[in-house]
Image (cartoon, rainbow, N blue to C red):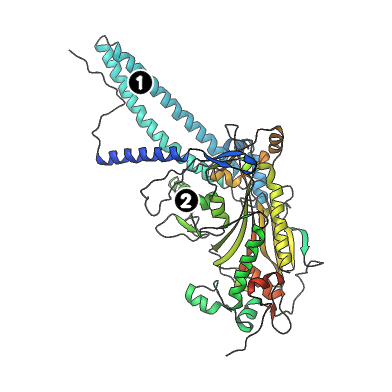
Amino acid sequence: MAIVRFNPFTTWRSPTTTTIHAMRRRRLLMRTVAVLSIPQQQELQGGAKVYRYRRYLSSSSKQQKYEDEISLGLKMNLNYSWIAENAHKIQENIKIRGSDADAFEVKTLYEDFLSSKRRCESMRSERKNIAKEISKMQKSSTGQSDDNKRLEMVQKAKHLKTAISQSERDLAQKELILEYKASRIPNITSPETPLNDKERLIALLNAEEERDCSLSSSSSSDHVQIGSDSLKILDFASASKVAGSSQACFLKNEAALLELALVNFTMNYISEKGFTPVLTPDVARKTIVERCGFAPKTAAVAALKDDGDKEEDGDPLENQIYQLEKSDLCLIGTSEIPLAGMMAGELVHEKELPLRYVGFSHCFRREAHGSGDERGLYRMHQFSKVEMFGFCAAQESDSLLEEIIEIQKEIFGLLELECRVLEMPASDLGATAYRKVDIEAWMPGRNAYGEISSASNCLDYQSRRLDMRYRPMESESSSSSSSSSPSSSLSSEAVSRSGKTAYIHTVNGTGCAVPRSILAILEQRLHADGSVHIPKVLVPYMGGRDRICPKSST
């Protein structure tokens, strides 16, 4: 009697149409990834050849449900072991930054994740050993007792398969929650950053001494009154009918030309400094928005709710950024988001760095209702902005930040605006920033300084989330400078596990936030006759107009 040998872990099923289509999609995806993994040879100045790899884009041709995020296959490279080993130090930094993250909770979650992972691997190993034993018994079966023993082992293997499947689901959920909690931990803080709540004055622009904001002011030079009533170049009333908010404005006549003049001047000036001009998309995927540090991952929030954690309520993007319905796209709050996303999943050679960009975009923010000294152009739902963004090697981020700050100072110096440059305190830094320097313009209508520009060094905070790496040059000097860079204190894994790549550092800075720049020009450059004088550097961009004169009421 012939004995039919079978593998207890393989069950034959007739392939359905759905299964065949799924297999075809997988084969197509593998071919797509293979093509995208081919190094793209590029030639730099001097004849040096480098290779750039695209290591992501798990593209599915079939869009998921509307509310689901479309994955780009970007894996966060957060160093959980370093967080667990330095939990006390990290928690101190969290307290200084005023964040609600919890390094000790991350440590506990990581230890639990590792324990679950070991149990899962142990069950896989046990099941594999059972499969080997069954295979041996099938080849050397001698009687009924061996068959009974083999059937017992088959049943045990089936139970293990079910247990492994459940364990893998639990492990995936634990990893998602761990990733979310760890991603909320803010960047480390620069030694240059004041640890109290008070900013430090670095320099003054177009002024000899700092204004005393505590002194009462009799000035009536409020930009809303100047622009709406006298010059008739700002129309908030009509915009509120159209946009349904007082945080919108029609820029008319010279105000429209002034916006274009500011954008063109800034883009030209910065591009002459070696920055590549870019017009960015005004929309970005949720994945890119979140990985840039502007919001936590929504899928993880759902997992937290399923896990009974009631700390997170509602969509974390809902109160920060406009989302497009039935889409995984958001309106960007700054061109920093699409500029950073350009390099997502990229591996470049250090010879290509630094990469400097100056981007223009419209920005959309769900700001709280502006009132008092934040009314008018100071806080808008939509505005135009020029942004500088740089990708660099670890040892270059400090110098690139200083370069961007100098450009900002030059721009506002040429715009003839009275400003102050401030080293911002730790409590004022966003989660992504290692160091942040603001430029504030004097705004007589508010009797206070107001932020018109900001620059930040984010180290490898964004690149770890967007999976952006570079291949360091093979030299001792490069190795020594890289080891002394700030990222080495951020993580013991400044260089990737392979030891051949490192994480790119990102630096950003405002070139020109248009509405607040217009606000400062209207209030600072108002003359006794009611006219506003245009900064000389903008006159060529204004068709030769050197002032905006009051218009009579009709």
- Identify residue type, mark 1: Ala
Looking at the rendering, which quadrant does residue 497 occupy?
A: top right
Q: Are marks 1 and 2 in contact (CB under 8 Å)?
A: no
Q: How many marks?
A: 2
- Residue 423: x percent and y percent? 73, 56
Q: Position of residue 215 (x, y in %)?
A: 77, 73
The residue beneath circle 1 is 131
Residue occupying the far top of the picture: 142
Check the image and report above or below for 17 versus 277. above
Q: What is the quadrant of residue 165 in the picture?
A: top left
| Residue of label 2 | 298
- Identity of the amino acid at label 2? Thr
- Front residue of this view, candidates 546 and 495: 546
Crowding near the residue tagged with mark 1, few <14, some 14–19, many ≥20 C-alpha atoms within 10 Å: some
Across and down, in percent, residue 83 comes to 61, 39
Q: Is residue 39 above or below residue 209?
A: above
Residue at the farthest front position = 47
